Image (spheres, rainbow, N blue to C red):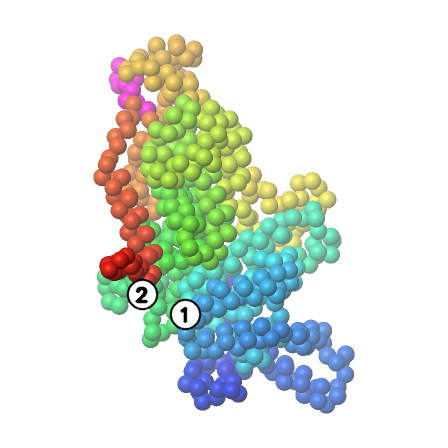
Amino acid sequence: RPRLRTSRARSDVRPSRGSRQQAARFEPLARDQGRAASKKRGEASSEARARGEDADDAPPSAMADLAKANEPVPDMVKQFVVYFYRHIREKNVYEILSMYEKSFPAISEKYFKASPWPHAEAVARFADNDHVFGLMYKELYFRHVYGKVTPTLEQRCESWDNYCALFDIVLQGNVNMQLPNLWLWDMIDEYLYQFQSFCQYRGKVSVKTKQELELLKQCDNVWNAVGVLNYLQALVDKSGIVQTLANERESRGPDASFSEREGYDHKASNVLTALGYFALIGSCRVRCLLGEYEPALLALDPIDLDKPGLFTNVAGARVSVAYHVGFAYFMLGRYTDAARHFNGALLFVNRRKVSATKLHGMDLLVKKQEQMYAVLAMCVVLGGGGSGGGSSGAANSAVMRALEEGVAAALREKHGDDVSRMSQGVVSAYDDLFSFGCPKFVTPEPPKIGGGGNGGDATATAIDPGSAAANFNEEAYRAQLKLFLADVGAASKLPTLRSFLKLYASVSVAKLASLMEIDEPTLREQLARMKEKTTVLQWNGGASALDGSPVCVADVDFDVDDADVVHVREAKIVKRDDEYFLRHIEKQNALMADLAPAKPLVYKGGNTLLAGA
């Protein structure tokens, strides 16, 4: 594994002029840090201007920094930076969360709807030129750039360098802050989104000029898949989160209450621990983007996915885990396990959509919800063994029986026609839903342009930028689609076999072959394939997400005895009232938990006064 870059930036936090006595009680955001390099450059520039030196004599990088530092800053941004920095210094998690979740989006929408925020160099003087705060501000700055405007190659590289510097400081163990889990999750989530965005950007070779291609060759180490995974693994190792979660699972020591206190510790910073926890989820996501599904599930083995944890308290993390774990199970053919994770996340998003309080990042959650519905529709059909039988056969599959009533009804409304088409063997229906529901796959290596990039393999086939197939992004998607459609095509003959099996309780192989007008070896091959497709692994508890026992998921099961007689068993749906009531009790408990912070209602009627419990 390549050695991580070490940040040499230093930071010294001094009290603001208006509150020197109060700020004297606070520790720096990063202990044992020297003065920031940006502060030195600013002082040097000020001295140069005082001496009357010509600015043209300065190097281009210094000129650029000077221009950024002299950028005008609106009063609203000044106030935001001052108070945001103060609350971080005071470790006031509630106020930090309020400003991050509400104030920053509100100011962005009002003043910077189609333009970036002021540069970090311009606002540094309002935060005592604190280097660590500057890195955190840049993280928000580049996130806004990615969300509102199209970032340039230079901005993409600067954002990568900023994440490297920020993570290096965290890995050095010098951070002295308490930050909201929501922000820390968003850091990891945005870090991976920008990695995915850069892979998509570099893959569009045909729309780039020769100059852009030459610049791109020099950025092979920027947003590299190995480097991204390297930082995620370093956060996991340095934080010791795997051992912490193991202690919690066995109820040993103070770690036994890790999830209960949501990772916060008044004696120490929560930044490294929470980032290490969310890095586990991030590793799963990267593996899914690379098409490595078993390693994606193994990455989450330290986390109990079937129990409440830190990820269930952050909406984005909860939905991300459900989507990527569900998709990994889907590509491994474990459709019941995929449906189980999708079902829980879809219920959560449905409940939050009708909540009185708008959830942070709700638009992204709704988009991910639509993708999960698309993949779930394929699970319903393939979870019946891909054996067709129309929508009724899919409705009786084990996957459909595992869904909650509200999720099943929404699925029928959104993709009822698609389910019918897939049940009839229409391959284009699978293609459409897969292209919509799958993640944006990436390749671990950049495209080899014009004979290869720096350090590229000389034997690799170079891509001609002018060719029609110069969109390198499609290669990863086509590879995954080809594997999926090959699996679907292997079951294309099974609907006919299923329809004949439903007519008999027992039938000889010879008679069944004559009815289907095929020879006996071909029939035995189709019977073996149908048995394989209708039997999947299902997780029933265990330390690893890859554990499971084989179960039949189709509405028709069969066995072939020694006398070459096929014995057919049709699955009977047994409605269990206990599961129905348990589901509604859980829904009631969830609603009561949402209403718990609300004030009790008081009703006045005549001489009677009733207070709501």
Residue 487 picture location, percent across and down: 46, 32
Taking the spot 34% from the left edge, 10% from the top edge, the residue there is 511
At label 1, counting other C-alpha atoms closer than 10 Å, the crowd grade (few under 14, some 14-19, many 20 or more) is: few
What residue did someone put label 2 on?
261
Quarter of the image with the C terminus is bottom left
Locate residue 117 relative to residue 299 in the image: left or right.
Answer: right
The amino acid marked with disc number 2 is: Arg
Residue 61 picture location, percent across and down: 68, 73
- Can you tell which quarter of the image residue 397 is in? top left
Taking the spot 59% from the left edge, 55% from the top edge, the residue there is 198
In the structure shown, which secondary structural element does the residue marked by tag 2 occupy? loop
Q: Nearer the viewer, mark 1 or mark 2?
A: 1
Locate residue 486 relative to residue 197 in the image: left or right.
Answer: left
Taking the spot 67% from the left edge, 85% from the top edge, the residue there is 46
Q: Which residues are magenta?
A: 556-569
Residue 238 picture location, percent across and down: 40, 66
- Can you tell which quarter of the image residue 375 is in? top left
What residue did someone put label 1 on?
94
